[in-house]
Amino acid sequence: MTTTPSFRRTALLLLGIISLLTACRRGEDDPFISFIPRRERLAENWELKVYSHSMETADGINIGFNDALCDTLAEKGNMVTTLSSDHLFGDNNLEITYTNAVGSQGTTRNFDIEFNYFIQIDRHGAYSVQGEYNYYDDIKKSDLKGTFAVENEKWYWVDDDKDKAALRLMNFPYIDAQNLVQYGVPVLYVPERIFHLRELRKEKMVWEEYEDYNFDKSYQSDSFTAYDTVKNCVRTEYIFHTKQLEARWEFAPGNPQ
């Protein structure tokens, strides 16, 4: 079968158009073909509809000596502090479970919060957020309510406008269980936050976050003498920190009432 020059030109033109249109598809769940650039799809008034967030951290320290007689301050031992939090939001209801433990002893608090979260993003690199919360504090035995907002803060593509796969938002009001437990407010303003932009279409926007961080290091003291008699003592300190986080934010077009 032979092809004519006209057919080949038409085929190349169609391939070029498809390549141009699919170039706008950056997230795993983006539309396969879109006539609207990702920046234009991002510029919208959005309402948080579904949110899930799970985080676990552990900080530990272990102190030991090469000779038990060198432990003049009774430092030898192991101490591990763990924090865990789970967030689940839907239908304007935010449920949070927060656990703080030292060793095998810990406390858990549960919160049931009326909550809403709106974000307005413009195509020129500015965004604004506003929201409200209302819940009963079982320790203070009272209802606590409040609002949160930022105006005309900055957002950037993480990759300098090339790939458009992730967002960096400055002074971002982040939903935070630890701030809720410490100060009674379920939102913490963080200097910046990065989100993977998994899905972006006219009727839906999805952010995702993942962290899997591990750090450990050992420190060893110089040789010292304990009680003026025990020579060549060495103190060893081992520290570690781990963090696992997974979160998903789902938005739909919407404005505050």
Image (cartoon, rainbow, N blue to C red):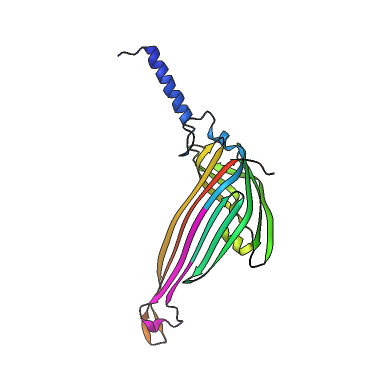
Residue 247 falls left or right of residue 142: left
| Residue 179 visible in rendering | no
Residue at 64% from the left image edge and 68% from the top image edge: 139
* Image spot of residue 123 (x, y percent): 60, 36
Q: Residue furthest front?
A: 91
Q: Residue at x 52, y 51 (%)?
A: 52
What's the magenta region? 53-81
On the image, the x and y values in percent for residue 153 come to 63, 45
Asked whether 136 falls inside the magenta stretch, the response is: no
Quadrant occupied by the C terminus: top right
Viewer-side residue, 90 vs 68: 90
Quadrant of image for the N terminus: top left
- Residue positioned 62% across, 56% down in the render: 113
Of 141 and 74, nearer the camera is 141
Residue sitting at the far left? 1
Q: What x and y, as percent, mark residue 255?
A: 66, 41
* Magenta stretch, overall SS: strand
Number of callouts: 0
Closer-to-camera residue (251/152): 251
Which x, y percent locates residue 217?
Answer: 41, 65
Q: Is residue 105 visible?
A: yes
Residue at 52% x, 59% y: name it: 85
Q: Quick check: 168 above or below 13? A: below
